Amino acid sequence: MKILKYLMISSLLIVIATACEKGIDPISSVAPGTDESAPELTINFPLEGTLIRVPEEIATINIKVEAVDDIELKDVKLQMDGTEIASFNTFKDYRRAMLTYSYNNVTDGEHTLTVVATDLTGKNISKSVNFKKVAPYAALDGEVFYMPFDGDYVELVSVNEAEVHGAPSFVDGKVGKAYKGATDAYLSFPSAGLLGGEFSTSFWYKLDGTPKRGGLLAISPVGDSRSVGFRMAREDNGANQNLFVNFGITDSEVWMNPFITVAPSDSWMHIVVSISGTEANIYVNDQLVKTAPITTPIDWTGCSSISIGSGMPNFGYWEHYSDLSQYDELRIFTKALSADEVHSIYTMK
């Protein structure tokens, strides 16, 4: 019986081995080919012109770099103001390196980050970006939120970073850099401490009409209740776009739709919404374009977060999804802005 058992096991192993070999191409080495090109290099952060605003005298930044070679990378070196601060020569993927390095000695003033990527044959590429550490931000009267989008998603009053959904990007803005929306992309930020009986928001906006509908700014509860919270969105009107605001005052919703009808263009427009306990006003490019009387202050019940560049996740109905437009200099106030204050913000450099 033992002999028979061993024979059966041996036969089974032979069958398995034979089956495993069938239908599977044998592994063979492939010559890597000729190294023809120097590496490609992208500095993802800091970007050219990034401004670092933190309370600390000495700041920490996370340098983010991507290097790619057609055959194999040898090393990637980081230099700050001409002095080497880090060197990498071991990579999980020998052709592509995604590197993050925390540099904790950024002092006030201008700085230059230089990155050099070299392949095994000695070909290299060097790129540099200039950035600056400046004094901490001094909030305007009643201002509780300011996001300049200068190469990062840091809100400068609290010095906290927004949560990034999807893959938005940065482009040249009205002032420095600006947020550029992407499909399924938006930012979110906790609303605690940012909402009061009076509410204002201002930002620069460059309208992209694709897709035909999009959410701009949403402070909305879970579900489809519009008797609370605040929503700004756009919808197509032929070749133009209607921009509108909707907000809740407990027992009803207020519509200011549209407050402007405009064609998509490469021009920036400045939008301000100012809501007191008795009146809502909307300004475009320093001009009052829409006003509405209200009976009670805006109601924020259940509104726990702010969405920027989309109606998602709580105002995605009616297809107010991510907006591919550009945003810059986004501010929120716990006060109603006067016409003079609107003018002052509009003329800021």
Image (cartoon, rainbow, N blue to C red):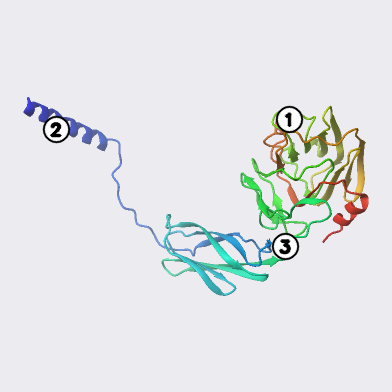
Q: Determine crowd level at label 2: few under 14, some 14-19, many 20+ residues with C-alpha closer than 10 A.
A: few
Name the residue carrying label 1: 318
Q: Determine crowd level at label 3: few under 14, some 14-19, many 20+ residues with C-alpha closer than 10 A.
A: some
Task: Give the left or right position of residue 255, taking residue 44 as reference.
Answer: right
**In the image, residue 204 lies at what x, y percent?**
79, 51
Disc 3 secondary structure class: loop
Vertical comparison of 268 with 220: above or below: below
Residue farthest to the bottom, as pictured: 82
The quadrant of the rendering that contains the C terminus is bottom right
The quadrant of the rendering that contains the N terminus is top left
Task: Give the left or right position of residue 134, taking residue 114 as reference.
Answer: right
Q: Which mark is residue 10?
A: 2
| Amino acid type, residue under disc 2 in the picture | Ser
Name the residue carrying label 3: 136
Mark 3–mark 1 Cα distance, whole angstroms, equals 40 Å
Task: Give the left or right position of residue 131, taking residue 209 as reference.
Answer: left
**In the image, residue 180 lies at what x, y percent?**
69, 50
Disc 1 secondary structure class: helix
Vertical comparison of 212 with 225: above or below: below
| Amino acid type, residue under disc 3 in the picture | Pro
Vertical comparison of 246 with 1: above or below: below
